[in-house]
Amino acid sequence: MTLPVQRLTSWGRVMSSEQAVYHPSSRFDPLPAEARTYLPYGKGRSYGDSCLNPGGVAIKTGALDRYIRFDPASGVLACEAGVSFDEILRLVVPQGWFLPVTPGTRFITLGGAIANDVHGKNHHVAGTFGVHVRNFELLRSDGQRLLCSRELNPEMFAATVGGLGLTGLVTWAEIQLRRIHNPWINTETIRYGSVAEFFELCELSDRDYEYTVAWVDCVGTGQRLGRGLFTRGNHAPAGTSAGRHNAKAHTFPFVPPVSVVNAWTLQAFNSVYYHKQLRRSARQVQHYEPFFYPLDGMLEWNRMYGPRGFYQYQCVLPKAHGQAAITEMLDAVAHSGMGSFLAVLKMCGTISSPGMLSFPLPGVSLALDFPNQGERLQQLFTRLDDIVRAAQGRLYPAKDACMPGELFRAGYPQWQKFAGFVDPGFSSSFWRRVMEEK
């Protein structure tokens, strides 16, 4: 069988590669025998090179989109790995259930959520997505099909959760959903003035609110350093009604010749966005879509960074060093003149993930988007890497495009154990890069 060749691009649009593409039509299909290496590819929402495998075969899972079983009494759902979070929500929300953990986009697959062990605004109370995975089937390059759970093949289960698709192809999975009464979220947004105030708000909010997150003004310096908007929320109780939700999304229409995100637009946007809320605190009832997925309201939003694309830099820092390190990082970003308008701060809690390479650790996470500005931006990344290293933190592989191998290995102490579970027939640009393989 001759496989078609396609150029695949990651979400940051900086990296792409020509790869043979295989489209399994069923979870029962075998892998093509003639491939050198494989790598699963879902919706392509990884920002860097963890979803790319030049010279290998991309297993595109879009046709693995069948539901296997759903129990509306218990909230246990089993479906194929190519089913998206958007599709799951459309099925389960009207029946009183919600995803136990979700990142900032619903346009990811179930298999991708497991491979990257995604986390969200409720990590402090729910942990990562992997905590709520009951079991899955793993198809290995030698044709083995392993049923993996905490009881069956538990070490392969732990390697696959957060394992970046390197242990084999997850064909289907079973997860435990979270009970809700309706699609509404009770929210409060608080305007705050400093990094210290962000941490104070977290201390006050994490006990009573399931979801907490903050947008940070990354261009502010001096007394404005670290200021932002802190949002907290809970699923609304039974009987709540907030009218109709307009679910219509717009599409960023084209790739502009240069990035629309630059020093001038950043200054203007961040100032306007910070001051959009006139009062210090504002409460509202929101539909879950704009609360969890504000960027999904603009499809193909990654185009706005122009033909050179963009990088995301996301780190997590232990609580003991978090406030000082975040302050230092935001100061470095502000003085570089390359601030981010999609800057997100959130706390990670103490619930351990089953995954060997799971990203969160107890502390604080900072995510930043930057237009690709070549060597100038790489110099800033080197400075940020130094701060993360000194704070004993780590970077998120799902968002990464240039992490040094030694920083990965220092941040993920189980990497050697994990390497023993990597399928010899699976590989990626990211893995070869951080393992410093030629």
Image: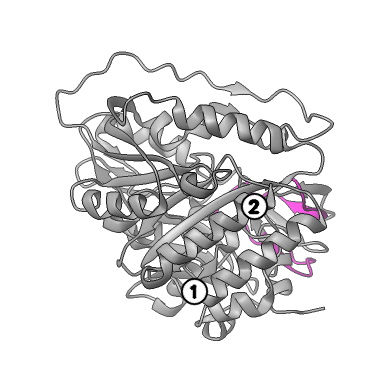
In this view, 280 is above or below 113: above
Task: Answer yes or no: is residue 47 visible.
Answer: no
Q: Position of residue 385 (x, y in %)?
A: 62, 69
Q: Toward which corner of the image does residue 128 lie, by quadrant?
A: bottom left
In this view, 207 is above or below 305: below
Question: What residue type is disc 2 on?
Answer: His
Q: Quadrant of the N terminus?
A: bottom right
Question: What residue type is disc 1 on?
Answer: Ala
Q: Which residue is mark 1?
A: 391
Label 1 packing within 10 angstroms: few (<14), some (14-19), many (20+): some
Q: Is residue 87 magenta?
A: no
Q: Residue at x 33, y 55 (%)?
A: 199
Q: Which residue is mark 2?
A: 335
- Magenta residues span 11-39
Question: Left or right of 286: which side holds 22?
Answer: right
Q: Nearer the viewer, mark 2 or mark 1?
A: 2
Task: Answer yes or no: is residue 105 visible.
Answer: yes
